[in-house]
Amino acid sequence: MTASPTPLTHELESAHRRGVAAAGHGLQDAALGALRLTGSGVPVLAEAAVSSATPFLRAPLLSRIFNALRIHPVQGDGDGQCPTCRVPAPCQTARELNP
């Protein structure tokens, strides 16, 4: 069974598509002169470049999300409260980070 995509999934996929488009335009930029790339291989190279960089770009984001969830646990503390916000768990931060 496949989980349904979350808003964060959609945002990450959209950012990936925009990154591929930007990389493709960059590879074809006339300012590169003789190094400028053209042809049907440009989209493949752009996708490969963005896919290779993605783990390095996502790692800091995922680390921050993990750290935020440690101080805003979805299940709360022993009293069912967010230990940071002191409201019933899950707090707004936990709901946003863990839809």
Image (spheres, rainbow, N blue to C red):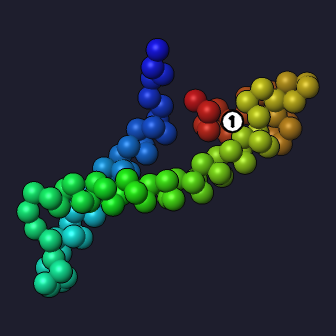
- Label 1 environment density (alpha carbons within 10 Å; few <14, some 14–19, many ≥20): many
What residue is at 24 percent from the left and 60 percent from the top? 45
Residue furthest out toward the right: 78
Residue furthest out toward the top: 1
Task: Say which residue label 1 marks.
Answer: 94
**Please, what is the three-letter code of the amino acid marked with disc 1?**
Ala
Q: Is residue 34 above or below residue 94?
A: below
Name the secondary structure under disc 1.
Answer: helix
Dividing the image into 4 quarters, which one contains the C terminus?
top right
Q: Nearer the viewer, residue 43 or 62?
A: 43
Query: Residue 72's x, y, as percent?
Result: 76, 39
Residue furthest out toward the left: 39
For the question of whether residue 19 can be seen, the reply is: no
What residue is at 43 percent from the left and 60 percent from the top? 53
Q: Quadrant of residue 46?
A: bottom left
Q: Quadrant of residue 22?
A: bottom left
What residue is at 8 percent from the left and 63 percent from the top? 39
Query: Residue 13's x, y, as percent?
Result: 38, 43
Left or right, 2 with reference to 92: left
